[in-house]
Image: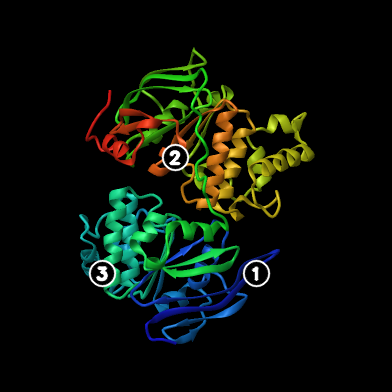
Amino acid sequence: MSQSILIEVDNITKCFPGTIALDHVHFKVRKGSVHAICGENGAGKSTLMNIIGGVFLPTEGTIFFEGNQVSIRRPKDAQDLGISFVHQELILCEELTIAENIFIGRLPKRYLAVDYVKLFDQANRVLERFSVPFTSERIVSSLNVSEKQIVEIAKAISLKSKLLILDEPTSSLSEKETKKLFDIIRSLKEEGLSILYISHRMAEIFEICDRVTILRDGKIVKEKNISDTCPDEVIQCMVGRALTDMYPEKNINSGEELLRVENLSNDGFFSNISFRLFKGEILGFAGLVGAGRSEIMRSLCSIDSKTSGSVFLNQESISFERYCDCIRNGIVYLTEDRKSEGLFLEMSVKNNISVVDLKNISDDLIIRKRKEDLLTAAYCSKLGIKTASIDSKASSLSGGNQQKVVISKWLAVNPKIIILDEPTRGIDVGAKSEIHKLLRELASAGIGIIIISSELPEVIGLCDRVIVIHEGRISGQLLSNQFSEESILRLASGEISIK
């Protein structure tokens, strides 16, 4: 094997009960390169990375590392080889210092106690490579998401890693934070570190990666140098078809007013938010991370408190004391954190879909299994939810199918208005297209839809109208014929304001 190859995965197969997750997968990663792994949710990316990281054992196949056949039977084996895995959901001890997190399990000792002077010195030397505005004495809970991610990467560097696996590293980062991460990746690459980069974002892959391997249904369908391919080819290989209609046709004529919000405020978060939503309209809320978009919707739905403001539903003034009042009046909110707040991951698909509609599947306080099964089967069919069984745990589904379960749950209560916070975060392009089409179908049926999204192509391609938030205030409103990434970004950054 060539000395320029760091790791070679040779004919790896992984079988789970009833499914083949990986089918004779073979690829190589060169030293000092950034290698993208792409594929729809459920294509096998996570399984493959978990095998390389020692979480799963392969059913068949061999791994070579630096030219030698290796056995990676547990995460410690991977770590000893120089393989580090930074998961999408960061694994840090929030109440410990940065230094303790970086060297956890390897704390320097002085006599029988931790040598904190040496610990902070060693950790600060690692952090110096990243030019960060904080020292290792800080408590991790005081950091933002991008800073926590740097701590995870610093931990990997302290282990003298040779291969760094980054799983959807920008899913919770702003554009500025993403650029900072890319600077770090380029620096690590120059030092000879190899990086496996898992992402659904084509722009990022074509900016930072050297080579791409594409998985579909557990098999590698293509592997190419980035310079020899294009985003359209990668997407077509991922989904097995051309996505010529990523965004469905927009609704030019909206109906009557469904919702009117006047001067909604929550001191310290946002102030004087006023807007209207019409029947059959998809209204977008854009802005930078931290601008207050999610806070506005959570206060509107009485999930969080509000200081002042009025809400009108179908022209009538209405007051929500609790979120359940909101649901009873036909307004539902889909959280941006579907795993923590949107799903019961260890409960079945069936239970997750029926949980807010127990009244209609029960007789005399007893849940009727047949009614529950019929309800679930209907939504699985309608939304195209891919699951081995309606009794499968929600945790077993891909991100796109999990989001469809969340949508199904709230459709079961026949809402008039659906508010979705980052509806396609962490979802592959094929599932995104399906969810976009579903939302347009719901709007065509007369449901009013509000979308909060940090992905400008999604905002521009899907929404009929966009309200832009800057530092807790509306900086402007754009109609469909006024949309452009530049116009939205200028409003979001406060460079201009349209009143």
Residue 56 or residue 252, whichever sits in front: 252
**134 is higher (above) or lower (below) than 434:** below
Instruction: Report the Cα–Cα distance between label 3 and label 1.
Output: 46 Å
For the residue carrying disc 2, how many other residues have a C-alpha within 10 Å: few (<14), some (14-19), or many (20+)? Answer: some
List x then y, in percent, for residue 130.
Answer: 24, 62
Instruction: Report the Cα–Cα distance between label 1 and label 2.
Output: 39 Å
For the residue carrying disc 3, how many other residues have a C-alpha within 10 Å: few (<14), some (14-19), or many (20+)? Answer: few
Q: Which residue is mark 1?
A: 15
Instruction: Tell me which label, 3 or 1, sits earlier in the chain.
Output: 1
Instruction: Tell me which label, 3 or 2, sits earlier in the chain.
Output: 3
Can residue 86 be seen by looking at this rendering?
no
CB-based contact (under 8 Å), mark 3 and mark 1: no
Residue 404, by quadrant, is top right
CB-based contact (under 8 Å), mark 1 and mark 2: no
Q: Which mark is residue 111?
A: none
Instruction: Report the Cα–Cα distance between label 3 and label 2.
Output: 55 Å
List x then y, in percent, for residue 377.
Answer: 72, 43
List x then y, in percent, for residue 120.
Answer: 23, 65
SS for tag 3? loop
Q: Which mark is residue 115?
A: 3
Residue 443 or residue 274, whichever sits in front: 443
Can residue 391 be seen by looking at this rendering?
yes
For the residue carrying disc 1, how many other residues have a C-alpha within 10 Å: few (<14), some (14-19), or many (20+)? Answer: some
Q: Which residue is mark 2?
A: 461
